[in-house]
Amino acid sequence: MDKKLLWERCVQFHGHEYGGLTIGYKATLYAIDLLDLKFSSDEQVVCICENDACEVDSIQVILGCSIGKGNLLFHMTGKQAFSFYNRTNKKSVRLMLKKRPESITREKSLEYYQSLEPQEMFDVMAAKIELPETARMFDSYVCDCCGETAGANWIHLQGEKNYALIVLKNTIALMYNNLNFL
């Protein structure tokens, strides 16, 4: 694995070098070492990120985790924490970014994080979030109210009619708001 080439691919994908991108890059390299990970052509590797910032782009590039494949998930806590799972060997880990020195400004974070080894950057702990099931495929149905197609997991059957859950949600909200005006 050519780390310099991987870094360049991350920067190209993200658009610029940044400290946050480095955090994701180093977290991913560390997870590869800890869990014996390889690029995920399907769902062999799963990553659950606790933020949706720059770091995530490195994870996508290096491990092939993506929202579309269902192996890049978000559990939003705002923390710089990343849980990696290897479905093949059943290993997992949660990497939590250690606090950086207060003297390191945001502008200097790229240089700071580039100078560290992953072991210096992250606390390693057991993954807190249970490994999700593999992505499921759903049939699609047309909503009898809005006429738009949605996956079966987003359709509610009421009587003989299919209703998109968003239609039901909006209808209930409208009914509730009308009750408040009585």
Image: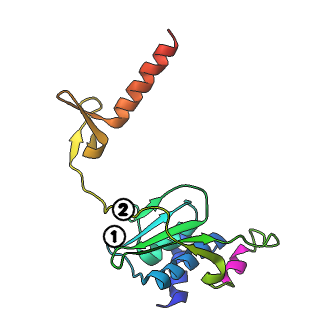
Magenta region? 109-114
Please state if 119 lies on the left or on the right of 43 as rendered: right
Predominant SS of the magenta segment: helix
Q: Can residue 16 be seen in this view?
A: no
Q: Is residue 97 visible?
A: yes
Depth check, front residue: 101 or 130:
130
Which residue: 78% across, 69% down?
105
Number of marks: 2
Q: Residues within 10 Å of mark 2 (few under 14, many from 20)?
A: some
Amino acid at dot 2: Gly
Mark 2 near mark 1, Cβ–Cβ under 8 Å? yes
Q: Which of marks 2 and 1 is nearer the N terminus?
A: 1
Q: How far apart are marks 2 and 1 (CA)?
A: 7 Å
Which of the 4 image quadrants contains residue 149? top left
Q: Position of residue 10 (x, y in %)?
A: 52, 76
Q: What element carries label 2?
A: loop
Q: In this view, does 153 lie above or below 65?
A: above
Q: What element carries label 1?
A: loop
Which residue: 40% across, 61% down?
67
- List the residue tagged with mark 1: 43
Amino acid at dot 1: Glu
